[in-house]
Amino acid sequence: MTASPGTATADPTAAHAAPSLRRSLQHLAVHLLTPLLMCLGMALAYQGAFHQPEPHHLKVAVVGTTPKAQILAQTVKDKAGDALDVITLPDRQSAEQQLRDRNLVGAFVPNAQHPELLVAKANSDTSAMAAEAVFQTVATQQGVPLAVTDVTPLAAGDPTGQGIFFLLVALSIGSYGSVAVIGAAGAALGMRMRGLVGLATSLVVSVIGIATAGPLFHIVDHDRAAVWALAWLYSAGIIAIGTGLHTFLKRWTTLTLMVLFVMLNFTTSGGIYRPELQNGFFGALHSFWNGAGFVEGARSILYFDGGAGLGGRVFTLVLWFVAGLAVLAVAGGYERRQRTASLPVAVLAVEAAAVEERAAAEGAEELAEEEMEEAVGV
């Protein structure tokens, strides 16, 4: 039958193309959700943490026991409000010790002609700059130049003290990037084997990190074995947590690790701004997040003779690693239960296939017999 002029003819190709196009766009939109959420998360985290650094209880001191020193300390405190915590110390030696213990950001030594500010840039270059800005104003009001003395000289390859932060970035990317590979390419392996592969991978990541930061760029110019141990512990914790989470999160694992070990990690590590220059949220995370554990632990080793809270930072990294082992254990148990639950289904499928195969064979035999009978009858 021929269609009359002006009558639309159904196009079966177009009918199938529309649903296919819709499904393709929906599939694409779901996968684009991950990078878009990464973009939003990075914007919120980095701008939230770094867009307006202001002192919050920045700890400084005025050196001296005279009434004039006491009045100066109180005056600075009154003008600064909550931005500064100002104390007085009896002498220069006490001030230097407080700086080396990382209890102070700066210590002002008054002098009518040559006032001096003591800082520890290895603790945080940006915090030292904030303290310098405060007491530069005091010196300017007195009409004299301010001398700034750093009591913790930095490594030749790291004049700003921020090289450790960039080492943290390399270790983090190498670690969480490896999780995706272990989860995808190693899916056929058991959880215990994947865990061992992750442990070996963290060793390689940490060796790459210390080799570049040490002999190549001289950011770590001594105590390299100790800094390497921190790097390995840090990397192993990330890979263990990520490998375990992959069992449950699948394709959302990368986004989750980005949140944990980039967005919240880099911003709270103290590598650029320490808590005294950040808002309360990021400052609070600094006390127990693993990136801060590595950065502050490495600083304590390299510039503060292994003191200044090193033990607490190592303990933080150990806790993150233990948490990773716990996630691996939970994921391994879950996978074993899944395999056990799917075993009866697999057995039934094999039995069904065997039945079908036998039925097919019996049917073939019956057909052959019928053909032979027909042939004999002929």
Image (cartoon, rainbow, N blue to C red):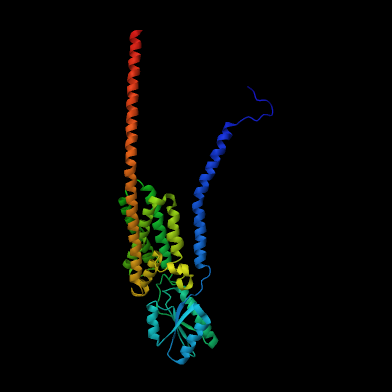
61 sits left or right of 9 in the view: left
- Which residue is farthest bottom? 67
Q: Is residue 207 above or below residue 104?
A: above
Query: Residue at left 38%, top 55%?
Result: 242
Query: Residue at left 50%, top 53%?
Result: 35
Most foreground residue, 175 or 253: 253
> Quarter of the image containing the C terminus?
top left
| Residue 269 in view | no
Query: Residue at left 41%, top 61%?
Result: 170
Most foreground residue, 267 or 217: 267
307 sits left or right of 61 in the view: left
> Quarter of the image containing the N terminus?
top right
Most foreground residue, 256 or 217: 256
- Which residue is farthest top? 378
Residue 359, x across and y down, in percent: 34, 25
Query: Residue at left 39%, top 52%?
Result: 246
Q: Is residue 113 above or below residue 288?
A: below
| Residue 94 in view | yes
Residue 127, x across and y down, in percent: 46, 75
Residue 332, x across and y down, in percent: 32, 51
Number of numbered labels in the structure image: 0
Q: Is residue 240 above or below residue 360?
A: below
Residue 191, x across and y down, in percent: 32, 50
